[in-house]
Image: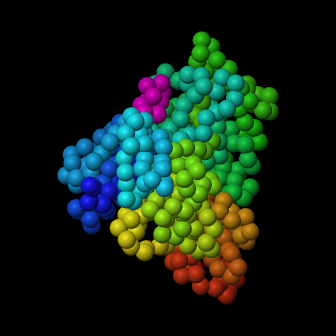
Amino acid sequence: MRLLTRYVIVGNGAAGTACAEELRKNDPSSQVILFTDEPYPLYNRVSLRHYLKGEIPERKVFVRDIPWHEKYGIDFRPETPVVALDAAGHTVTTARGEKIAYDRLLIATGGTPTPLAVPSGDARGVMYLQTMRDARLLEDVLPAARHAVVVGGSYLAYNFADIFRHWGLATTWLIRGPAFLRRDLDVTAGALADTLAAEAGVQVIHGEEVAAVQVDDGRVRAVTTTGGRTIAADLVGAGIGLTMNLGFARGQVEIHRGVVVDASLRTSSPDIFAAGDVAEFPEPITGALMLAGTWDNAAAQGRLAARNMMGGHDTYQNIPEHNTDFFASQITVMGITPDVRTDLESVARLDDTGRNYRRLFFWEDRLVGAVLIGNRKGKLKLLQMIRDKLPITGPREALLDPEALS
């Protein structure tokens, strides 16, 4: 008869690995089993772009190794997908046919790039960038490529545009909407993003998508767009979103866009939790459900889920924040934006000469989110105001002045 508490974690990304570490530190007599369908221990997906640009060696991408799991007594099971969940019976079943019982379960499976669903969209040269395997495949074909097309208006697509530009490829970026990050940036900010891309050597075309991929002997040679253009391409970088890895959990927990959890990261089944990209959680500002695909968010949620799996009652209070370079500039998105709630009010200001832009979002009488391009002065003040949830009594436009904020 099993007496030790057994924690099962499905997914060894930032959330799953942080959860495993927290469990072993604070419940050392327990069993922790960590499943992943990949052959690798934890690596930083955010670093894959920098690795492909030659800015860091491959070894710097990896965050954990096998000896680390052995040191902490974590039963690490690579290349072992979980294919079924029985919430009532407290078991998971792997692709190898093993049925594993659990006392508490964490779902931290992340997402898979949404495929390019057009004729010949599966041709050689249509690339994705979510895993180390994706990065190695792309690394093999970059040196021989001369032309590339990027598809999508997200950070995933930007990664491709930045990599292709770094390698000197003639790069065309197709964005279906009117702007990059169209829910967060208005048309003015979108134009600034296009300018920054053009200065980096990337041509941006809005309002068009890939209608079909043209192939020669099974390899990409061009794309045809919905606007009737034919664009030469040796590589097509598909950054059109992620599809959450939820197949094994359907019918066992509540699922919307991701696994729906409460503020403690508990699902509709009391002994099952979810964290990271796959968790659809109530953001702490207005309570709206959201997904947040950032490394820091995933790691923080993994640790919090572990504490609650051990019997705690913590709630997730982090303000979502994403910072990234954007060609020669940088973008910060924090708090909530129209991507989470469509009923927000906003004020915005563009400094075209300095290539700076900021847009602030309000719900009722409070500041709840912000987008900054270029100058980040005053960012910490804005973030504190979002956290404080205090009414804004003065002119909202005054908050657009970074000098006043600092």
**Closer to us: 272 or 190:** 272
Percent x, y for residue 188? 72, 57
**Closer to us: 72 or 63:** 72
The residue at 58%/44% (across/down) is 243
The residue at 37%/51% (across/down) is 101
Residue 226, compared with residue 320, is above or below; it is: above
**Closer to us: 145 or 139:** 139
Percent x, y for residue 48? 43, 42
In the picture as drawn, the residue positioned furthest to the bottom comes out as 393
Q: In this view, does 64 lie to the left or right of 157?
A: left
Residue 161 magenta-highlighted: no
Q: Is residue 262 visible?
A: yes
| Image quadrant in which the N terminus is located | bottom left
Q: Is residue 314 left or right of residue 112?
A: left
Percent x, y for residue 212? 71, 26
Q: Is residue 341 left or right of residue 137?
A: right
The residue at 66%/59% (across/down) is 339
Residue 9, compared with residue 26, is above or below; it is: above
Q: Is residue 331 visible?
A: no
The residue at 63%/55% (across/down) is 256
Q: Is residue 45 left or right of residue 252?
A: left
The region drawn magenta spans 132-142
Residue 368, compared with residue 35, is above or below; it is: below
